[in-house]
Image (cartoon, helix red, strand yellow):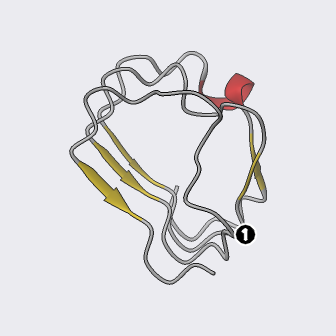
Amino acid sequence: MEHNEVHMLTKEDLNHCTSLTWLNMASNRLRLQGEPFIALQRLAFLDVSMNNLQSAMLGCQPQLPDLVTLNLGHND
């Protein structure tokens, strides 16, 4: 999903991706709404770099128990 002009990501967008282990959302215009990553219990790699995110907070509650790599580079 890298370089695709994604503007909004919600829980419903990823709700059926429960087996996903790698997600690259770099270089979009991403805004996170609610708990978009809550269903991704197997996710090991997440790249949300270069999205002008204002916070490293990816949700309001603990999630992503298998996460090994998180790339937040080049955000605000």
Q: Residue at x 48, y 71 (%)?
A: 49
Q: Point out the image quarter for the C terminus.
A: bottom right
For residue 7, which quarter of the picture? bottom right
In the rendered image, the vertical position of residue 33 relative to residue 37, given as above or below: below
Residue carrying label 1: 29
Foreground residue among 59 and 21: 59
Q: Residue at x 33, y 32 (%)?
A: 43
In the rendered image, the vertical position of residue 38 relative to residue 50, given as above or below: above
Q: Position of residue 75 (x, y in %)?
A: 57, 78
Q: How many marks?
A: 1
Question: Which residue is the extreme one toward the front?
Answer: 61
Foreground residue among 54 and 12: 54
How dense is the environment of label 1, judged by Cα within 10 Å: few (below 14), some, or many (20 and up)? some
Q: Position of residue 51 (x, y in %)?
A: 62, 72
In the rendered image, the vertical position of residue 6 relative to residue 74, given as above or below: above
Relative horizontal placement of residue 57, taking residue 72 as reference (left or right)? right
As shown in the figure, which amino acid type bears the numbered disc 1?
Answer: Arg
Q: Residue at x 58, y 46 (%)?
A: 58
Relative horizontal placement of residue 45, taking residue 26 as reference (left or right)? left
Q: Position of residue 50 (x, y in %)?
A: 55, 78
Q: Secondary structure at mark 1?
A: loop
Q: Residue at x 69, y 70 (%)?
A: 54
Relative horizontal placement of residue 24, taking residue 31 as reference (left or right)? left
In the rendered image, the vertical position of residue 17 relative to residue 73, given as above or below: above
Foreground residue among 41 and 21: 41
Relative horizontal placement of residue 53, taking residue 34 as reference (left or right)? left
Question: Which residue is the extreme one toward the left?
Answer: 68
For residue 34, which quarter of the picture? top right
